Image (tube, coloured by chain):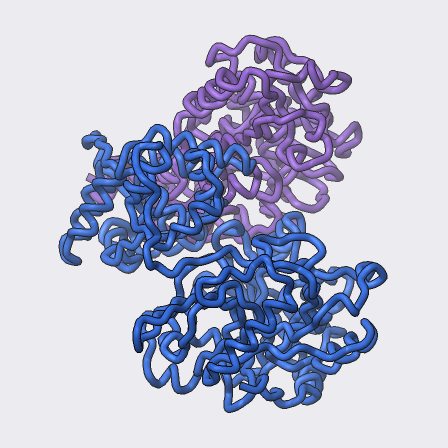
Amino acid sequence: MNRFAALIEALAFEPRRLAKLTLMEDYFRAAPDPDRGYCLAALCGALELPSAKPAMLRQLISERTDPVLFALSYDYVGDLSETIALLWPAPAGGPVRDAAIGAVVETLQKATRREVAGLVADWLDTLDERGRWALLKLMTGGFRIGVSASLAKLALARFGRVEAAAIEEIWHGLAPPYAGLFAWLEGRGPRPDPGQALTFRSPMLAHPVEDEDFDRLDPRDFSAEWKWDGIRVQAAGRLRGNDAEIRLFSRSGDDITAAFPDLAGALRFEGVIDGELVVLDGDAVAPFSAVQQRLNRKAVSARLMAEFPAHLIAYDCLFAGEEDLRSLALAGRRERLEALVATHGGRLRASPPLEFDSWADLARQRAQSAEHPAIEGVMLKRLASPYLAGRPKGHWYKWKRDPGLVDCVLMYAQRGHGKRSSYYSDFTFGVWDGDRLVPVGKAYFGFSDAELIELDRFVRQNTTNRFGPVREIMHDARTGLVLEIAYEGLQRSTRHKSGIAMRFPRIHRIRWDKPPAEADRLTTLQAALARAPASPDAPDA
Amino acid sequence: MPRAIGRGPRYVKSSRSVLDVPILETALAIRPETLLHPRPEGLYCPPGDFYIDPLRPVARALITHAHSDHARAGHGHVLATRETLDIMRIRLGDGFCGSEQAMPFGGSLTHGGVRVGFHPAGHVLGSAQIELEWQGCRIVVSGDYKRRTDPTAEPFALRRCDVFVTEATFGLPVFRHPDARDEAGRLLASLARFPERTHLIGAYSLGKAQRMIRLLRECGHDAPILLHGALEKVTQYYETRGIALGPLEPVAGRKAQDLAGRIVLCPPSALADRWSRRFPDPVTAVASGWMRIRARARQRGAEIPMVISDHADWRELQQTILETGASEIWVTHGQEDALVHWCQQRGLAARPLRLVGYGDEEAA
């Protein structure tokens, strides 16, 4: 664990991307199999240790520390693994032993649920503090060290002197600890055969459009479509006799097929499609909150699938059968996509192109879509562009709607997690309903680091009450802090006392100058909600 | 056998004390709040009509140490150690108060019937605990304090008392300060590995910076250390008080190639400032107790987080509370909830004072 712990700690404190790559390359060179393979899996989020659960770790620490002191410490540190690593009462003068990551992972994978707690406690007793942190991070996942799966794979590509895309093409056929992959990269073995595995292709991403771009761009060179507020999905499919094999990948290449068996089971095609996964409510595209119901679920129940059915609105086609279409112009790919969709039906449909003759015309349509809960804005795509991995300049643009703005009063604050841990950075805010404030949302970003320090100080100096980790902040007509909140849309909500939920709220400006009495009223938000049209129909199947 | 000593405190051996320190059981003639209690201006002593470390200008102030959250300008009469008064003048300018009076460590005076004594707190040069005694009740206000060895500050002197007013900056069990020399050693190891890169250390300008320099000297680094302008005056003052810091030079006016491989000290805020752009490819280090928490270290952009603190850590807070023998603990600022909880678990009366305004500087 020592070598692995040293690596992830160095990565955590190294801000420079190039130096991070070097650290990982050096590690892949120095560490033996299977340690480096499990480390790679951990960095890529591909390591599954189903028996190691946060609840078990909480149980272990609760047997060893005062629960109140643990809760206060966790609230402050904002990270379960780090809190336990710092608090763990290692036996004084006890043996300090190292346990290699490979041995730890393989022991955990073989252990029964009952054995795991004892194993983990034993490791925690004998590892040093950094080793404890690394072990706990390994078990709970989510290192928060500024390394994405793609960065780890890039370091691997540099280590093996191959293109990153060459690793990506075979990645989904591989499993930890990747002995064959390392053998190939070291010139000791053949390139692993991706075989029949359906693999993920790096997607093409868009730039936000700037006002001045419109002077340079000719509307005749572009196609436009709605920017649906779902999740970007790549669907790869193949037919085997009567059966279709389908895999769904998220934008970052995670395999999310298991979360959407209704959609995967309804698809039947050969090739690779790029599109937006949405939930339909009847024939209308439901707001993003409906898609959220389907995310991060342990089990996907039949009821959930019936209530929030997943559909795919396709906008591009990367492969038709075995044929790679990525070098074709968008117009050509679009024809192939429509041909594929036409023979399909069901839960797959094509994103309808918007007709427009000038940017002003498109701007009008975009404005008319305002407050439609499932439309975030408009996508502009150059008709002549091939499908290019990454975020190439000058091809695709996203033209998001302007956010709504509302002045709210800070009511409660809580300490944040991750980067913002130990600062008060989660803010609940409200608007006036008569002469009292009702909470309408929570925001935890939108401010700078300097503003965070000021907000944290304001919270600590204006606390009127405490409910566990939550601080109530002075908020009456004369004293309090007004926050200008930007949001992407409003929805009716039965969960909030105000009856309104905000989509993507964030702090747009801190109004240190504005008295709380002048903040907005609930009626303002209710009026904005009433203006929103009913959900428009989904594109025709 | 517990033995009563007149009306004053009596000492009993507590079976609950892990550290095996006797706990003082009080049989006080007065309620301690009549001697000292919080007001919006700060801690107030009615019989003496003075404040300790007031946050707003008052007529009479006793100051524990010169950090800006404790030592503010504009008071009428100020009583503090010679060092604290001198540093206040350096940082706040002449006329920082109406009149001043220096108190030597171990000395005492009586004002309004209250005996007032100053004793070293070990936090920074000149930092004092202030002891008040009136009608058989003794209260010690610690200010900020630490128990570790620090050749740049007078060592903490334990005072037994009835009420101990403690800080709680690092009042959570996750805070355990490691050996400061090991932390400084990590910086020097990095300098050996990257001899061409400037090593930039963010350290609070009063106390931490001078202690850091001294630590580097003790670890064998005797090359000139370069200082940000904000550190120069206070550091020079430390030297006039007989604290040897070795060769020191200003950063200002140096060319980029003249900065390679140097150790440069600056206030933490300068790390994120335009000032730091003059260094090509620097290694950034921060010396602070907060560096124990990885997220804090990353917020600061520290590549070498050094856990070096001028405050007591969790165990030292506990140790000190027990050793004072106090039966009542008042907590001024920091992570007061956890420390109050711990005291109450041990049967000590404890409460947070909820004084607003301390701990907002970078002094940790």
Query: What residue is rendered at 62% in x and 40% in y?
Result: B361
Q: Quadrant of the N terminus of chain B?
A: top left
Question: Where does the image place residue B260, in percent across and percent down from the top left?
Answer: 63, 17
The number of numbered discs placed on residues in the rendered structure image is 0
Which chain is in blue here?
A
Above or below, B4 relative to A77: above
Q: Is residue A289 left or right of residue A90?
A: right
Q: Nearer the viewer, residue A396 or A414?
A: A396
Which chain is in purple here?
B
Above or below, A350 relative to A40: below
Choose top left, top right, bottom left or bottom right for residue A371.
Answer: bottom right
Above or below, A223 relative to A143: below
Q: Nearer the viewer, residue A485 or A339?
A: A339
Res B2 seen here: no
Question: Where does the image place residue A452, in percent across and percent down from the top left?
Answer: 62, 52
Q: Nearer the viewer, residue B181 or A5?
A: A5
Res A524 seen here: yes
Query: What residue is rendered at 51% in x and 39% in y?
Result: B297
Q: Nearer the viewer, residue B6 or A417?
A: A417
Question: Where does the image place residue A534, in percent across and percent down from the top left?
Answer: 63, 90
Choose top left, top right, bottom left or bottom right for residue A270.
Answer: bottom left
Query: What residue is rendered at 60% in x and 78% in y?
Result: A374
Query: What residue is rendered at 81% in x and 71% in y?
Result: A359
Above or below, A126 relative to A395: above
Q: Is residue B81 left or right of residue A25?
A: right
Q: Quadrant of the C terminus of chain B?
A: top right
Question: Where does the image place residue B195, in percent across and percent down from the top left?
Answer: 55, 15
Q: Is residue A42 left or right of residue A163?
A: left
Which residue is outermost to the right? A215
